[in-house]
Amino acid sequence: MDLHPLKIFCGNSNPELGSRISEYLDIQLSPCEIKRFSDGEVFVDIKESVRGADVFIVQSTCPPVNDNLVELCITIDAFKRASAKSITAVIPYYGYARQDRKVSPRVPISAKLVADLITTAGVSRVVSMELHAGQIQGLFNVPFDHLFASPVVIKYVKEKFKNRDLVIISPDAGGVERARAYAKRLNASLAIIDKRRTGMNEAKAMNIIGEVSGKDALILDDLIDTAGTLTEATTAALGLGATSVSACCTHPVFSGPAFARIESSPLTEVIVTDTIPLSEKFLQSKKIKLISVAPILGEAIKRIYSCDSVSTLFV
C-alpha cells in the first residue's frame, strides 16, 4: 500500500532548522506564506494541495513566544481545513514549559493551557525536544514523542574532552537525572549545585555537592535563559578548584543580560543546539558552539511517516 504524500512546512520561528531538516530528509520544504495584517493578525496561505497528506509543521514557540504560538495554532487550523490526513507539530522548543505546575495559590498552569490550544487547533501528533518537565507529555491528549539532543551533544563532548577528567554538574536537583545519564555515557563523575531561587529569573548557587577539584567541569542544563544560574555555578566550580568550566544546553533562550554575562564570565565554551535560532552576536561569539539537532528531528519525521519505531531515538 502506498503511503500518503509527505509535506514538511516551516514556520517563521526557525527557518534555518527547517532547512537543515529538509536537507537531511532530501525533501524540499513545501511553500506556505505566513504574513501579518496591519493590525498584527496572522494570515496563513498554503501554496499547494495537502489533501490526504501527512503534514509536519516545524515551529519552535521561542521568543517572541506568543507570536510564534499563535502562528503555530493558526497554521495547524489552515492545514486541518485543507483536508490534510494528519498534522504533526514538530516543536523543537516548547515555550511555557517552565509553568508546568502551581508554585503558589493563584497562578496558572500555562503549560497545560498551551497544550490545550495546540490540541484544539487540530494537531494529530506532537514531537518536541528536551522538555523542561517530562510530565508535560501527559498534558496532551494526542500522541507525543519526546526526543533528546544527547546523541549529537555526547558525540561532540566525547571528542572535546577525550582523555580528560570530566565532571558533569547539574545546576539544580531537577536536572540530576539528565546529568546522571550524560555522566554515565561519558564515563564522567557527577556533581550537583544547591541552588536557591530568589525571584523570577533570579537564582543563587549556594554550594556544590560532589568533587570538582582538578577536573574539567561541564554544567549541563535543558535551557539557558538569563545565564544567572550559569555564571553563579561557574564561579562556584572554579572556586572549588575546577580546572576549567564549560556549559551545555539544548535550548539557548538567551534573554536579557545573557550575552554580557556569558562574554564576561570565565566560561571556556557554551555548547548549544539550534532548537532556537541565535542572534548574530551569539553566532559570532567565540564562546558559543552551535550543534544541529536536525538529524534527530529529521529521523523522527521519517520514522513517524513510515510507521517505524521512534523509541531508539529516546536516549
Image (cartoon, rainbow, N blue to C red):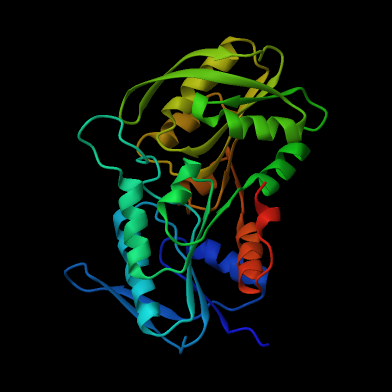
Q: Position of residue 185 (x, y in %)?
A: 75, 36
Is residue 64 visible from the viewing direction of this image?
no
Q: Is residue 238 left or right of residue 108?
A: right
Q: Position of residue 41 (x, y in %)?
A: 22, 70
Q: Is residue 313 left or right of residue 224?
A: right
User: What is the quadrant of residue 196 in the picture?
Assistant: top left
From this view, report whether residue 66 is shown above or below residue 23. above
Q: Is residue 154 left or right of residue 8?
A: right
From this view, report whether residue 14 is shown above or below residue 209. below
From this view, report whether residue 66 is shown above or below residue 285. below
Q: Residue at x 33, y 66 (%)?
A: 120
From this view, report whether residue 230 is shown above or below residue 80. above
Quarter of the image that includes the N terminus:
bottom right
Q: Residue at x 66, y 67 (%)?
A: 303
User: What is the quadrant of residue 104 in the picture?
Assistant: top left
Q: Residue at x 34, y 74 (%)?
A: 77
Is residue 76 visible from the viewing direction of this image?
yes
Q: Position of residue 115 (x, y in %)?
A: 37, 55
Foreground residue among 268 and 138: 138
Q: Is residue 82 left or right of residue 246?
A: left
Foreground residue among 187 and 38: 187
Q: Residue at x 60, y 24 (%)?
A: 169
